[in-house]
Structures are given as structure tokens and as C-alpha cells.
Image (cartoon, rainbow, N blue to C red):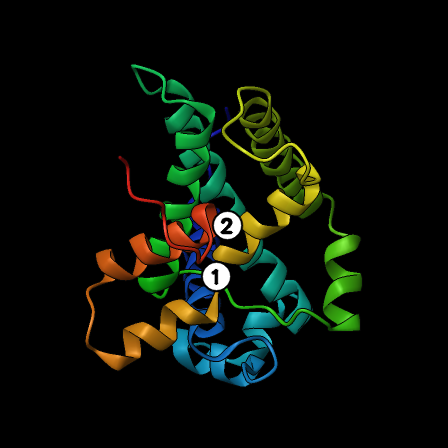
Amino acid sequence: MARLSFREQMLRVREDAIVDSVNRLLAEKGFDLMTVDEVAADVGIAKASLYKHFASKEDLAAAAMIRALDRALAQLERLRASQPQPSPLELLKAVARWSMQVQLAGEMPSLPSQNSSLRTSLLHNAAYLHRLTQVSDQLGEWILAAQSDGSLDTALPPELILFTLYARACDPVLTVLKAGGQHSDEQIVEWLLRTCFQGLMTTPAKS
């Protein structure tokens, strides 16, 4: 691999700083409220300099999402390599737990569910789509395995389970409970895991 020049290294450092800022601002404010001016000011560069790296606000959000998916792929790889290998259901729970912990730490980008310009930008971003497919394929494999061994309801479409897991990564209940200050992050995550995988019904007492 060719060694990067000093200038290239500095550009990469600046780009990393921009994406770090975008990731934090998206987690705090969401896409609609975040502005390019705010990102530039947070990084400490002129807006013109920022546009040398990213052409639009949508490109900034896409870069943050790509980084989030890279983190997710690294976590999935760690889970695949864990020994002894957990059951498919435990693997899915571990992914959901990790994604909620990331959100509670303020490190999960928050994007609007409906936004035409952003949606169009993401759907035309090959790097984003490739990573999203990789994450979805691995989760889908574990979902099917958990349904096959009877851990998950086979009457539920696998894609519904997949989208439910994705929803946990941006569940507003997490931040609402955290803002209340009455519960620890660990308690909040475990409660949300319970409602995700067991529902809201009382578990029958064992006789």
C-alpha cells in the first residue's frame, strides 16, 4: 500500500474531524436542525474548506452513516469470532444491546424517516448501500437461524424482525428515559431489550 503524503494525511485528519462533528451533531440535533455552517464552526474551518471534502449536507450525513455502518460491521465480526459461539438469538440480542449503548452514548446519527433529498442521496451512495447490505445480510442470517431453532416466531416475516432491530438503534424511548435521570443506562438497555424480544406481557410464573 502506497504511503500517504503529509498533505494527504492532513486532509484525512480534517475529514475525520468533520465526520466526527457531523456524527455528534446528528446524534444531538438530527438532520433537519444540523447546518453546514454549524459543522464548519465546530471543526474550526471555513465553510468553503468543508465543501472541498463534502459537496452537500446530504453528503455529510451519508459519511456519518457509513462510519456508523463500519462500526456495526466491526461489531458483527467480533460477535462472529466470539468463542464459544452464542446462539443466534443471543447474537441478535448482543447486536441490539450494542446499538442501544451507542445511542445512549450520543454516538448514533439520527436521521429523519422521511426526507427526499437525503433518501435520494443515500440510495445513490454505493459505499453506504454496500455496507447496509452487509449488515442486513448478517442479521438476516441470524434471524433465519433463530426462527429455525424455535427461538423467534416463524409467523413473523424476517424483514419485520430486521427492521425492528434497526428501530432499536434510534428508539426515542432510550433518550427520554435517560433524560429523566432516574435509571442507569444499563437498566434502560435491558428494559428495551426485554420489550423488544419478549413483549409487554407478564411472563407466566414457573410451577
Image quarter of residue 34: bottom right
30 or 152: nearer the viewer: 152
Q: Which residue is mark 1?
A: 19
Provide residue 178's location: percent of width, then percent of height. 29, 73
Provide residue 21's location: percent of width, then percent of height. 42, 69
Judged left or right of residue 30, residue 131 is: right
Q: Earlier in the sequence, mark 1 or mark 2?
A: 1
Other residues around mark 2 within 10 Å, as few (<14) / some (14–19) / many (≥20): many
| Residue 67, label in figure | 2
Provide residue 116's location: percent of width, then percent of height. 79, 71
Image quarter of residue 144: top right
Q: Amino acid at mark 1?
A: Val
Judged left or right of residue 19, residue 128 is: right
Provide residue 93's location: percent of width, then percent of height. 41, 39
Could you tell me which quadrant the C terminus lies in?
A: top left
Outermost residue, top side: 84
Secondary-structure class at tag 2: helix
55 or 111: nearer the viewer: 111
Secondary-structure class at tag 1: helix
| Residue 126, label in figure | none
- Is disc 1 in contact with disc 2, using a CB cutoff of under 8 Å? yes
Q: Amino acid at mark 2?
A: Arg
148 or 95: nearer the viewer: 148
At 55% from the left edge and 57% from the top edge, which residue is drawn? 167
Other residues around mark 1 within 10 Å, as few (<14) / some (14–19) / many (≥20): many
Q: CA distance from mark 1 to mark 2?
A: 8 Å
Q: Viewer-nearest of labels 1 and 2?
A: 2
At 73% from the left edge and 51% from the top edge, which residue is drawn? 125
114, above or below 12, in the image: below
2, above or below 11, in the image: above
